[in-house]
Image (spheres, rainbow, N blue to C red):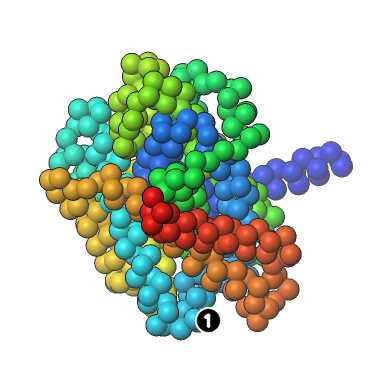
């Protein structure tokens, strides 16, 4: 009888976890978007395995930050943007979110650049692939529901694991990879510093913090669900870093070894075919398309959500257009602008892609400072304020990012 009760209890816990599963894995996986894949690809092709070590501290910070987001959402029932507005006031909120909106339009443009680049590899013009993909993304959100969208997003998350196969086909040097992790190195140039900021900015993007907290609220999670939510977050962060690791490895073990310079993820996919075979080339391109579509859906949702939240407008996928017109108008506008930029002749797509990630890294400390102040406020969080270790990691991340950003601004003066 005890065995039967244990089995029932175990299956009940599994069922509960599967019901809660989603926010952490989706938020983590969407980090590996077109901009992220481009940044990881360039890092691998340019510096080989040298910058892989950055993924370890990025993973630790990612888990801690997303845990804080989830905890704030569960305890307060409010989104991060809402809490920032209440504590900082409308004027400061306006300036913060204007900057974030500009960065996210750049990020969304990058996603559609990923759609265009991946489909061109398969012989489909961007003038066909981008408008059709944009329409598909728009229809999924405007005409769909959160539960349907979440299931599709989880399938997209799993699809990103194709990069593991692509990297293994490149026959990486595991000894060199181990050495780069055990003995971290970094060239102190403005280019390498910008790339490290980009790596951190794409692994821990500012907009993710808003999406994570909003998705926890939209899912209706409570403090009793905290343990399962934390597990969801950890799994999502592991998936994020594993995919990032194998993208860097795929490019380092093939492109860097041959001295091939690339500017975007499409270049990496094209260059892989003669070096690692057709399958690696196809998988890399397929992964780029999936990641781009995935993020082209999530990123405008997150942006629309936190902008509406910051200024007191209704927001949410489960609401109809009449119930949340500002949310859907903003979502439509971001997708439309991103699509138009991509279809413009001679648009500086590479610059938009790289610098949107750098902007993420520069804006991230601002968002993190707001988060750290809020999550340590007993009036807001009660007994669920941060523990000392969370504060050490959180404030440490803020300090490092500010230092790197200052280095990026100052170093050109001395070169």
- Location of residue 165 in the rendering, given as x and y in whole percent from the top left corner: 48, 24
Q: Nearer the viewer, residue 104 or 198?
A: 198
Q: Is residue 295 visible?
A: no
Q: How many marks?
A: 1
Residue found 58% across the figure and 62% down from its top? 399
Quarter of image, res 275: top left
- Location of residue 344 in the rendering, given as x and y in whole percent from the top left corner: 14, 49
Residue 310, placed above or below residue 286: below
The residue to which callout 1 is attached is 87
Which of the image's four quarters has the N terminus? top right
Residue found 34% across the figure and 52% down from its top? 355
Query: How packed is label 1: few (under 14 Cα within 10 Å), some, or many (20 or more)?
Result: few
Residue found 81% across the figure and 40% down from its top? 4
Q: Residue furthest right?
A: 2
Q: Horizontally, is 374 left or right of 289 in the view?
A: right
Q: Horizontally, is 163 left or right of 115 in the view?
A: right
Q: Is residue 379 visible?
A: yes
Q: Horizontally, is 289 left or right of 362 in the view?
A: left
Residue 51, placed above or below residue 233: above
Q: Horizontally, is 212 left or right of 389 in the view?
A: left
Quarter of image, res 413: bottom left
SS state under label 1: helix
- Location of residue 313 in the rendering, given as x and y in whole percent from the top left corner: 37, 76
Quarter of image, res 336: bottom left
Q: Nearer the viewer, residue 13 or 25?
A: 25
Q: Nearer the viewer, residue 238 or 261?
A: 261
- Location of residue 171 in the rendering, given as x and y in whole percent from the top left corner: 50, 17
Residue found 42% across the figure and 26% down from its top? 256
Residue 61, placed above or below residue 47: below
């Amino acid at each position: 009888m005890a065995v039967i009760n244990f089995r029932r209890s175990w299956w009940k816990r599994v069922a509960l976890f599967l019901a809660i599963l989603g926010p952490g894995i989706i938020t983590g996986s969407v980090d590996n978007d077109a901009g992220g894949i481009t940044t990881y690809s360039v890092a691998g092709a340019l510096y080989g395995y040298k910058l892989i070590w950055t993924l370890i501290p990025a993973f630790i910070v990612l888990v801690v930050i997303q845990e804080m987001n989830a905890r704030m959402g569960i305890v307060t029932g409010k989104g991060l943007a809402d809490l920032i507005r209440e504590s900082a006031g409308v004027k400061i909120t306006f300036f913060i979110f204007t900057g974030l909106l500009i960065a996210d339009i750049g990020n969304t443009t990058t996603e559609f650049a990923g759609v265009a680049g991946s489909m061109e590899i398969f012989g489909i013009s961007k003038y066909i692939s981008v408008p059709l993909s944009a329409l598909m993304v728009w229809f999924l959100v405007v005409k769909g529901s959160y539960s349907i969208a979440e299931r599709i997003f989880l399938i997209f998350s799993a699809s990103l694991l194709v990069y593991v196969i692509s990297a293994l086909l490149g026959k990486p040097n595991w000894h060199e990879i181990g050495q780069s992790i055990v003995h971290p190195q970094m060239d102190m140039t403005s280019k390498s510093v910008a790339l490290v900021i980009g790596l951190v900015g794409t692994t821990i993007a500012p907009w993710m913090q808003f999406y994570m907290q909003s998705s926890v609220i939209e899912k209706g999670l409570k403090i009793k669900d905290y343990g399962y939510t934390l597990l969801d977050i950890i799994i999502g962060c592991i998936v994020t870093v594993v995919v990032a690791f194998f993208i860097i490895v795929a490019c380092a073990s093939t492109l860097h070894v041959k001295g091939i310079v690339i500017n975007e993820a499409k270049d990496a996919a094209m260059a892989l075919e003669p070096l690692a075979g057709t399958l690696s080339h196809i998988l890399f391109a397929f992964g780029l398309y999936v990641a781009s579509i995935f993020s082209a859906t999530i990123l405008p949702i997150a942006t629309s959500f936190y902008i509406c939240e910051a200024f007191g407008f209704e927001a949410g996928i489960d609401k109809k257009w009449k119930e949340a017109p500002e949310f859907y108008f903003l979502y439509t506008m971001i997708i439309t602008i991103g699509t138009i930029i991509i279809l413009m002749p001679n648009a500086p797509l590479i610059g938009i892609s790289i610098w949107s990630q750098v902007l993420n890294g520069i804006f991230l400390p601002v968002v993190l400072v707001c988060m750290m102040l809020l999550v340590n406020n007993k009036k807001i969080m009660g007994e669920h304020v941060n523990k000392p270790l969370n504060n050490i990691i959180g404030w440490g991340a803020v300090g490092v990012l500010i230092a790197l950003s200052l280095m990026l601004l100052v170093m050109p003066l001395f070169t």
